[in-house]
Amino acid sequence: MTNQVLTLANGETISYLLERRLRRTVGLKITQEGLVVHAPKRIFEFQLNQILQEKSNWILNKLKAREANQVEKIQWADGDHLLYLGNDIQLNVTQSKTNKAAKLEQNTLKLACLQPNNHALISRKVIQWYKKQAALDFGRRLEILATKLGVTTPPLTLSNAQSRWGSCNSHGNVRLSWRLLQAPPHIINYVICHELAHLKQMNHSAKFYAVLENLFPNYKVVEKELKALSPHLHRI
Ligand SMILES: [Zn+2]
């Protein structure tokens, strides 16, 4: 693979990775690294250039979409931006003689620790904070929404799941991923309502969705919102 630069008619440049392969056509791919071009071994540079110029609108649109979708990784350092109940909060790390538990003050998550540059320690402390808040917050919501549905509040377990936000087993135990605490309250409520509806219907039948709709009328819209938000909730 080689690094190349494509210069468009308007002077704009697009850098890309070129890989020559045994193939007949030119293939374009947008990856994490950006544009990757797979070209036949025998193609002339001017021919390749012409093809890329013709496809430049497609390339620019794809690159723009990729940029919009990219979620910034957490550095686990002072100044990091985090999500809490759908709000942006900022991590403030300071040095102290002992490691203290993280504490939220307005929109700042304050963390005082022995080694303010220890990313593993910071990540552990922040996740500890999320889990503690999640247990309190989800517990309260579960109680309120269970009452609304007319069932006894089921036992709650926090999970570490990356892909499933919630689940409910045949014993009526509800599991929720602590990562969900990053989402806005109405999305958390929706996930809880979904799991609670399973206490009445242990399936995803039409009857189940009727129970869910009664408890949370807007569920279809919020389900989509959650899907769109998921990459952001997976940052941690
Ligand atoms: Zn379900």
Image: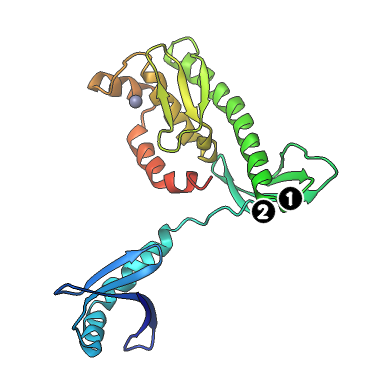
Q: Quadrant of the N terminus?
A: bottom left
Which residue lies at the image location 70% right of the left edge and 50% below the top edge?
Answer: 118
User: Residue 188: x and y, percent?
Assistant: 48, 32
Q: Nearer the viewer, residue 167 or 214?
A: 167
- Left or right: 65 in relation to 132: left
Q: Pointer 1: what residue?
A: 93
Q: Pointer 2: what residue?
A: 77
Mark 1 neighbour class, 10 Å CA radius: few under 14, some 14 to 19, many 20 or more? many
Residue type at the position of mark 2: Ala
Label 2 SS:
loop
Which residue lies at the image location 39% right of the left edge and 47% below the top edge?
Answer: 228
- Left or right: 173 in relation to 46: right
Mark 2 neighbour class, 10 Å CA radius: few under 14, some 14 to 19, many 20 or more? some
User: Residue 96: x and y, percent?
Assistant: 83, 46
Q: Is residue 34 visible?
A: yes
Determine contact: label 1, label 2, CB under 8 Å.
yes
Which residue lies at the image location 60% right of the left edge and 32% below the top edge?
Answer: 131
Q: Nearer the viewer, residue 99 or 59?
A: 99
Residue type at the position of mark 1: Val
